[in-house]
Each structure stands twice: as structure tokens, then as C-alpha cells.
């Protein structure tokens, strides 16, 4: 009966506790290391995939730019060696009424065709100042009008490369002796090399896809053929056409999830996309992760076996001693403990009379150690969680006041403190001003503008010396300044806030317990303080940048608005209409929907019944759509379009698309206005220089006056002008 009372359940035995402890100590680190390794491998794998795509995109961009440079070099060679300006002037301005002779055209065509066999250009063409194609070296597109084409408009200004349909066009203005354009010379590039660059799809055994997308979101090269006109409305294409470069995971034009790198190519006015299927990119990554899992499982098994063997080696002698003790308790007092080892267990067997006491002390010691380690681990985990949470807060909030308040409250809550205050050095550098404080105490001190002079008190000393200051028992620190709002503080620490190599403030943490701030918590608090200092500096800089950007935006918007008002008032209103007869210029039209769109600055949709009464489309049945054209906040015109009744009413997608087109039109109009204003300013400056040059050539007063009045009359284009020199003063008048 006594022996049965000495028996204990396995879960309460030392053997079980040792086994459990060894398993926890041996297996948990293995699992933690395996998890961290898997996460790092996953992040590294995705970063490597993106890095490879970035390298491929850079390579293709470099190849494209090299090809474009070759195009420009050959185009320049043609311009210089094929007498482009001379032939262009003769063809556009023939000397006889019969026009340009066929022999001359054939002569120039043969001369240009010498350069088409080099693989860079297919043909060359010539357009007059109105955008009409009057000559082409190969093909049959003469007399076509490209007046409104962007590449023609750009060709009137400077040499440009444009992506037009399934072709790449290089254009350049032809100028007369005065520098005025009288035509446009251009060439259609052979896109074979472009397709070779974009069409390469395998590098290092990895399958990827690359292609170009024009501003109409249509694939130009790399997928399909130009005739298919594959629409690409993916995230990468949209971001790149907005002028941005980067990488992302998104569905491609087939609906497959891909890792894509996108870039905007200004030289081609198109987007370059390089993509690889996410499943292909992660295939090797999954193999590595599976290997890590298998290795982790194997290590866990080995750790479990070692823990079991070690436990058995320790527990088996103890079990023998227990059996001996049970027999002794049953009455076999003559038995001695069997001693087979010369360690502590052997000593325990030799000192059998004190066996029970020593065993109880050993168990208590082990439990205390496990508890202490568990408590230390839990405390460190809480510190790490608090640091991570502070990091999340400082990285997600840019509002300075909200950032300071949340950080102070978060530190107080996570560390169980009595009070937390955040001080910042003012502009004079003389005072540390309280910017955030927790609880009712903090609100009171903020309300009275609590501040501490630099060098005084714990906070001032901390800032002046750029070192933390800790007080284990506040009554013993003569330097501490005790606010009346915080009577229960027993220990306090002041930690400097460092950013950009200087101290910008301090963090004051206070506790109701004596000696509450050890080295571990001080290290964590200093790390948090450094994060807070950087976040406060970044938030302040962000606010300053936002204010500067807003001021610049308002200034530019006001200048643009005044410029458009002056332009429209000075040059009158402009109206164009496009129908079956073509594009024609009209007098401004007054219609209710137009006036409403101009007045309210919003899109106006009229149904078929209302549109029948419209002055613009009163001869047709259908619905109208009027969209205001905005430049900044100013409405400078409208786009009015018509949809026949057989095609139904306007859909939301059609309205949204037309509004996007109108927005692009507003950008183009603003650019054209700016260009016109620049040209006018340049002309005025040139006229002033000419007048100044002519005046400096005159040495006599009479010649100077005559030259000045003649130049002014010529520049101002007036029939008469008068200038008089007089010595009569205002007083004499």
C-alpha cells in the first residue's frame, strides 16, 4: 500500500519533465530557424526574379536605344548626302506651272533608294507644310493628309521618332534660310531589328515575354502580329504609359499571373514590358522550400531522438532509486541503493538518507530555471513586438502631431509605464518643448506649454550630453525637475532622439516602481527613440515638401489660367468640326449643352429627344455628349460629339473613354500654348536684337534717329511713326 502511494503518474515524473524540456529547447530553435530560412528564401527568390527581369529590361532598353541611334545616324546621313533640303524645296515649290518633272522625282527616288537597302529604313517621304504627303520613295501613299497626326506636328518643330500604327517613323523639318519650316522629310523604319530585340524570349533557360505597348494600349511588337492589334490593359502597361517605371505582380493580357517589369520609353512614346509567369519564376523556389521543410523535419526527428536518449540516461538511475525507496518504505530497510555511477546520482545513492530532500530541491531548482527562462523570453518577445509595432506606426503615419501622440501612448501601454512624454528642441535651440504626453497628466502639461531648458533637468541634460540618463529612485537625483502633475513617479529615464547626426529631442519614460529601467529595456527604448527621431524628421520634411508643392501648383495654375484668358481674348474663339466632309474650321457655335458645360464644368449627356432640339446636331436623330476641356481649374472649351439613334445611348465606358481623351487633349493644348508663347517671346527677343544691332552701327544722331524710326515702323507693321527729341521740361510745359 505504501509502495503504491509512492508511485506517480508518468506526466508528473521527472523523466517526462526532462523529456519535455529537452524537446522544447531542441525542437523550437530548429522550427524557428527553418521558418526564418523559408521566409528569407522566399523573399530572396522573388527579389532575384525581379532583379533578372530588371536586367533583361535594361538590356532590351539599351538595345532599343542603340537601334534608335543607328536610325538617327542613317537618317542624318540621308539628310546630308541626298540633298533633302534642295530636292524638297524644288518639289514643294516648282518653278513652272506644270509642276515637278517625273525625271526629277525618279532621280531623287533612286538617290534615296540607295539608303533603303541597308536594313534600317524601308522608304522615305516628303510632306508639305499642310501635312499632305507629296512624295514617297517606295509605296503609293502620296497626296494623303497627315495634318492632325502627332508625328507631323512634331516634325514641324524638330527631329522626332514616332510609333505610328505598325510602323516607326522618323521625321525632321525642312527650313528655309530664315529658319521657317516649309515641309517635313521623314522615313519609315524597318522594324525587323526591333522585333528581334523584343521577340527574344529565352535567357538562361527561363521563359519570359517582352513586348512594346503604344499609347493606345495596343501591343506593337513582341506578341502576335501588328494586324491582330492585341489590347494590353494590364497594370504594368497602365503604369508605364503614365510615365512610371517599376515592377509588380498582376494578370497579363492572357489572364495569367505574372511578375512584370515595366518602363516608359520616351524616345518611342511607348511602354516596354518584360514578364515571366509567376509559377515559372517560383518553381525553383518551391523546390528549395520543400528541401528546407524536409531538412527541418529530419532535424526535429533527430532532436526528439536525442532528447529521448538523454532523458532515459538521466531518468533510469533515478527510477532505480525510486524503486529502492519504495522497497525501503515497504519495510526492506536493509536494502542499500545500488550505486553504479560516480556522479550526482551516485552521490545521491551514497547519501540515501537525504535522498528525498535532495531530489525535491533538484526538482524545485529545475522548475525555477525553466520559469525564469520562460519569463525572460516572454519579456524579450514583448520588447521585440513593441519595437516592431513602433516601427509600423512610424512608417505608416506622416502627420506629425498624430505620430507623436500615438508613439507616446504605444510605448506607455506596451511597457506598462506610468507616463511617457516626447520633447523636441525648439528653433532657438534653448528649450526642449513637450510635444506629446500620455494620459490626463500629459494633456495638462501640454495645455500649459511645459518646456525644459537645455542642460537642466534630466531631459535637458540628456539632450545637451547626447546620452540617456536614468534615475532608479527619483528623490535621490538632485538634477531631476519634478512636475506637479506627476506625483507618483518613482523611477525615470530620459533618452535622446537622434536624427541626421544631431539630437532633435528626448523621450521621457516614468514608472511607479523603483529601478524599473534595466539595460535591456533601455536598449530597446533607445532603438525606438532612434526610429521615432527619424520618423519625426521625415514627417516634418514631408510637410515642408507638400507645402512647397502646393504653392508651386497654385502658382502654375494661376499663370496658366491668365495665359489662356489672354490668348482667347486676344485671338478670339476657335471652333472645329469633323464629319463625313472632313475637318473644317467654323465660327463659334452657341448651344444650350455647350453653354451648360462651359458654365458648370461637367460632362453633359443629352438623350435622343433632347438632342433633336440641339443647334449643333438638329438635322440628325440621336444623343449628344458634351465634355468640358480643362487646363488646371480653368474650362477653356468643350468637346461636343454625336451618336446616331440607331447606336443607342452613350454608355458609361464610352463616356469615361471620351473623358480620358479630352483630358489628353487638354494636356496637348497646354503644351501647344506654351510652345506658341515661347515662339512669340523668341521672336520678340530676336527683333530687339536686330534693332539694337542696327542702331549700334549708326554713329551720327540723325542716322541713329532715322534708323530707329524705320526699324520700329517695320517691326510694328504700321504705316507711319514719329519720334521727336525735345529739351522742354515738365515745368516749362
Image (tube, rainbow, N blue to C red):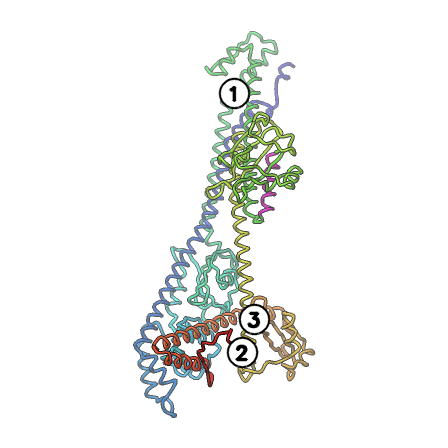
Label 1 secondary element: helix
**The magenta stretch spans which residues?**
400-416
As displayed, is residue 345 above or below residue 132? above
Q: Main secondary structure of the magenta part?
A: helix
> Which residue ends up furthest to the top in the rendered image?
334
Residue 175 visible to the viewer? no
Quarter where residue 431 is shown: top right
363 left or right, relative to 149: right
Quarter where residue 54 is shown: bottom left
Q: Which dot marks residue 316?
A: 1
Residue annotated with mark 2: 571
Few, some or many C-alpha atoms within 10 Å of disc 1 (few <14, some 14-19, many ≥20)? few
Q: Nearer the viewer, mark 1 or mark 3?
A: 3
Residue annotated with mark 3: 662
Residue closer to the observer: 432 or 332: 432
The stretch drawn in magenta includes residue 693: no
Q: Nearer the viewer, mark 1 or mark 2?
A: 2
Residue 316 visible to the viewer? yes
As displayed, is residue 68 above or below residue 704? above
Few, some or many C-alpha atoms within 10 Å of disc 3 (few <14, some 14-19, many ≥20)? some
Amino acid at each position: 500500500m505504501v509502495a503504491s502511494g509512492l508511485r506517480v503518474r508518468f506526466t508528473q515524473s521527472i523523466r517526462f519533465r526532462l523529456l519535455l524540456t529537452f524537446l522544447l529547447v531542441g525542437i523550437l530553435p530548429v522550427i524557428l530557424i527553418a521558418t526564418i530560412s523559408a521566409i528569407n528564401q522566399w523573399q530572396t527568390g522573388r527579389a532575384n526574379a525581379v532583379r533578372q527581369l530588371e536586367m533583361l529590361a535594361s538590356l532590351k532598353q539599351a538595345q532599343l536605344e542603340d537601334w534608335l541611334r543607328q536610325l538617327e545616324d542613317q537618317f542624318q546621313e540621308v539628310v546630308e548626302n541626298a540633298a533633302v533640303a534642295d530636292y524638297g524645296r524644288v518639289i514643294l515649290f516648282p518653278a513652272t506651272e506644270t509642276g515637278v518633272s517625273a525625271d526629277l522625282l525618279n532621280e531623287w527616288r533612286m538617290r534615296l533608294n540607295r539608303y533603303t537597302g541597308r536594313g534600317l529604313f524601308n522608304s522615305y517621304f516628303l510632306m508639305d507644310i499642310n501635312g499632305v504627303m507629296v512624295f514617297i520613295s517606295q509605296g503609293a501613299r502620296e497626296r494623303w493628309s497627315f495634318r492632325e497626326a502627332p508625328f507631323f506636328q512634331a516634325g514641324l518643330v524638330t527631329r522626332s521618332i514616332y510609333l505610328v500604327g505598325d510602323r516607326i517613323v522618323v521625321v525632321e523639318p525642312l527650313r528655309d534660310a530664315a529658319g521657317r519650316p516649309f515641309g517635313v522629310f521623314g522615313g519609315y523604319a524597318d522594324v525587323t531589328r526591333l522585333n528581334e530585340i523584343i521577340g527574344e524570349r529565352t535567357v538562361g533557360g527561363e521563359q519570359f515575354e517582352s513586348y512594346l505597348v503604344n499609347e493606345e494600349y495596343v501591343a506593337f511588337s513582341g506578341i502576335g502580329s501588328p494586324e491582330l492589334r492585341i489590347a494590353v490593359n494590364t497594370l504594368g502597361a497602365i503604369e508605364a504609359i503614365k510615365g512610371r517605371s517599376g515592377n509588380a505582380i498582376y494578370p497579363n493580357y492572357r489572364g495569367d499571373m505574372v511578375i512584370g517589369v515595366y518602363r516608359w520609353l520616351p524616345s518611342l512614346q511607348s511602354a516596354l514590358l518584360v514578364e515571366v509567369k509567376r509559377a515559372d519564376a517560383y518553381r525553383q523556389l518551391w523546390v528549395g522550400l520543400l528541401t528546407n521543410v524536409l531538412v527541418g523535419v529530419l532535424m526535429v526527428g533527430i532532436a526528439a531522438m536525442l532528447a529521448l536518449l538523454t532523458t532515459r540516461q538521466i531518468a533510469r538511475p533515478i527510477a532505480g532509486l525510486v524503486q529502492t525507496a519504495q522497497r525501503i518504505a515497504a519495510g526492506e530497510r536493509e536494502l542499500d541503493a545500488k550505486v553504479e555511477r560516480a556522479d550526482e546520482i551516485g552521490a545521491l545513492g551514497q547519501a540515501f538518507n537525504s535522498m528525498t530532500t535532495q531530489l525535491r530541491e533538484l526538482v524545485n531548482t529545475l522548475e525555477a530555471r525553466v520559469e525564469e527562462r520562460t519569463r525572460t523570453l516572454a519579456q524579450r518577445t514583448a520588447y521585440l513586438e513593441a519595437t516592431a509595432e513602433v516601427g509600423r506606426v512610424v512608417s505608416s503615419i506622416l502627420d506629425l502631431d498624430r505620430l507623436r501622440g500615438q508613439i507616446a501612448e504605444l510605448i506607455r501601454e506596451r511597457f506598462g509605464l506610468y507616463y511617457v512624454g516626447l520633447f523636441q528642441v525648439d528653433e532657438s535651440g534653448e528649450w526642449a518643448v513637450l510635444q506629446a504626453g500620455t494620459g490626463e497628466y500629459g494633456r495638462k502639461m501640454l495645455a500649459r506649454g511645459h518646456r525644459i531648458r537645455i542642460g537642466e533637468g534630466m531631459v535637458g541634460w540628456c539632450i545637451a550630453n547626447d546620452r540617456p540618463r536614468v534615475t532608479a529612485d527619483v528623490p535621490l537625483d538632485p538634477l531631476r525637475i519634478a512636475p506637479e502633475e506627476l506625483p507618483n513617479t518613482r523611477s525615470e529615464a530620459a533618452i535622446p532622439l537622434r536624427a541626421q547626426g544631431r539630437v532633435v529631442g528626448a523621450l521621457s519614460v516614468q514608472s511607479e516602481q523603483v529601478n524599473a529601467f534595466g539595460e535591456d529595456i533601455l536598449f530597446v527604448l533607445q532603438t525606438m527613440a532612434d526610429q521615432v527621431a527619424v520618423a519625426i524628421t521625415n514627417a516634418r520634411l514631408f510637410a515642408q515638401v507638400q507645402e512647397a508643392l502646393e504653392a508651386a501648383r497654385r502658382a502654375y495654375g494661376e499663370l496658366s489660367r491668365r495665359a489662356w484668358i489672354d490668348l482667347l481674348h486676344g485671338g478670339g474663339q476657335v471652333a472645329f468640326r469633323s464629319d463625313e466632309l472632313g475637318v473644317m474650321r467654323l465660327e463659334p457655335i452657341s448651344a444650350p449643352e455647350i453653354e451648360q458645360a462651359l458654365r458648370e464644368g461637367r460632362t453633359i449627356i443629352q438623350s435622343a429627344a433632347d438632342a433633336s432640339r440641339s443647334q449643333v446636331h438638329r438635322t440628325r436623330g440621336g444623343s449628344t455628349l458634351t465634355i468640358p476641356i480643362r487646363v488646371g481649374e480653368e474650362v477653356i472649351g468643350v468637346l461636343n460629339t454625336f451618336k446616331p439613334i440607331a447606336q443607342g445611348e452613350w454608355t458609361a465606358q464610352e463616356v469615361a473613354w471620351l473623358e480620358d481623351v479630352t483630358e489628353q487633349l487638354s494636356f496637348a493644348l497646354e503644351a501647344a500654348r506654351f510652345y506658341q508663347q515661347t515662339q512669340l517671346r523668341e521672336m520678340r527677343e530676336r527683333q530687339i536684337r536686330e534693332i539694337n544691332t542696327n542702331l549700334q552701327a549708326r554713329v551720327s544722331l540723325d542716322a541713329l534717329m532715322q534708323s530707329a524710326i524705320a526699324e520700329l515702323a517695320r517691326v510694328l507693321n504700321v504705316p507711319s511713326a514719329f519720334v521727336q527729341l525735345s529739351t522742354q521740361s515738365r515745368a516749362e510745359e
